[in-house]
Image: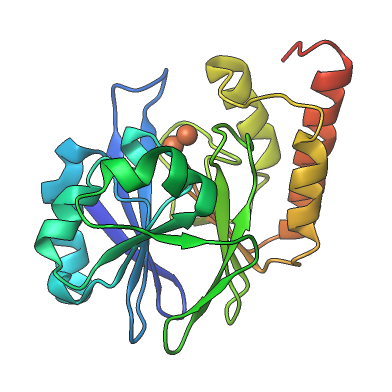
């Protein structure tokens, strides 16, 4: 396995590791590094991927400069390596929503995390990230996404996940492949508020959707969020047939 690095927006790096034996045609595990006065990582990758991910970070900036460790929800690919990163970067701190800290991270993190309220911004110095609570979207009570204001980047986490090898950025449709993967994995918590939560993300008017699994895109971002919301609404109304 190898971890590829692409700068997909000014100062925003996608670290991507393709794992061939997940799903029918493999699956990418992506982390995003925001280079700023206070560098921030979104998704740590699984614990066993730490050697690859930490080396990739080190090709962009000294690992010990990492200041913020963030992710969408509590799963190994989201945060499995957080304590290894805390050990490697002495100034680093996990930042997550208040609920996630209360339920899990105050206990799981080797150093106390910073708890954020919905809409709270961290000024990274050159970049600004807004924390947005999205409970149970795509899954997990503590789920959240992150929006970088200067580039209009929405870090979507598992939203729009799709399988297979892929480029860092695509101009193709990401909704169709996401719905295909949804039928395969059935990973999304289909709730009465799922569609409304995703539609609210479209009001941010994102210019870049940064996906944890699959290709990111700068094309039709708001429209893709609305189409994804419509598809989930139809599943909920149709009795969750995917
Ligand atoms: Fe997940
Ligand atoms: Fe994931």
Residue at 82% across / 10% down in the picture?
239
Q: Nearer the viewer, residue 95 or 165?
A: 95
Q: Residue at x 31, y 34 (%)?
A: 76
Considering the image in quadrants, where does the C terminus appear? top right
Q: Give the image location of residue 147, x and y in percent.
A: 59, 66
Q: Quadrant of the N terminus?
A: top left
The residue under the point 59% across, 61% down is 117
Q: Is residue 105 visible?
A: yes
Quadrant location of ligand 2? top left
Residue nearer the viewer, 12 or 145: 145
Colouring scheme, one of rainbow, by chain, secondary structure, one colour:
rainbow
Up the image or down, 175 lies above or below 208; here it is above
Q: How many marks?
A: 0
**Rendering coords of residue 137 (x, y %):** 64, 38
Q: Identify the image quadrant of residue 180.
A: top right
Residue 225 lies left or right of residue 238; in this view the side is left
Residue 104 versus residue 68: which sits nearer the camera? 104
What is the quadrant of residue 179 in the picture? top right
Where residue 44 appears, as percent x and y from the top left, is 30, 50
Q: Position of residue 122 (x, y in %)?
A: 49, 76
- Residue 1 visible in the picture: no
Snapshot quadrant of residue 217: bottom right
Q: Residue at x 19, y 39 (%)?
A: 47
Q: Is residue 237 left or right of residue 172?
A: right
């Amino acid at each position: 396995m190898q971890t590829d690095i692409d700068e997909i927006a000014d100062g925003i790096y996608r670290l991507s590791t393709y794992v061939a034996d997940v799903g029918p045609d493999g699956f990418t595990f992506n982390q995003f590094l925001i280079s700023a006065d206070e560098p921030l990582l979104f998704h740590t990758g699984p614990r066993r991927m730490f050697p690859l991910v930490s080396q990739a970070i080190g090709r962009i900036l000294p690992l010990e400069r990492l200041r913020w460790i963030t992710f969408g929800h509590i799963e190994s690919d989201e945060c499995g390596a957080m304590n290894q990163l805390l050990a490697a970067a002495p100034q680093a701190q996990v930042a997550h929503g208040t609920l996630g800290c209360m339920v899990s991270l105050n206990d799981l993190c080797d150093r106390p995390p910073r708890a954020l309220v919905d809409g709270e911004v961290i000024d990274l110095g050159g970049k600004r990230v807004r924390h947005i609570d999205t409970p149970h979207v795509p899954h997990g009570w503590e789920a959240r996404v992150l929006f970088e204001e200067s580039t209009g980047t929405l870090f979507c986490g598992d939203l729009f996940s799709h399988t297979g090898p892929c480029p860092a950025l695509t101009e193709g449709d990401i909704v169709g492949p996401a719905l295909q993967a949804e039928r395969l994995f059935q990973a999304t918590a289909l709730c009465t508020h799922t569609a409304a939560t995703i539609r609210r993300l479209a009001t941010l008017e994102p210019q870049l959707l940064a996906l944890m699994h699959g290709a990111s895109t700068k094309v039709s971002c708001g429209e893709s969020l609305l189409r994804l919301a419509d598809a989930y609404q139809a599943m909920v109304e149709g009795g969750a047939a995917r």
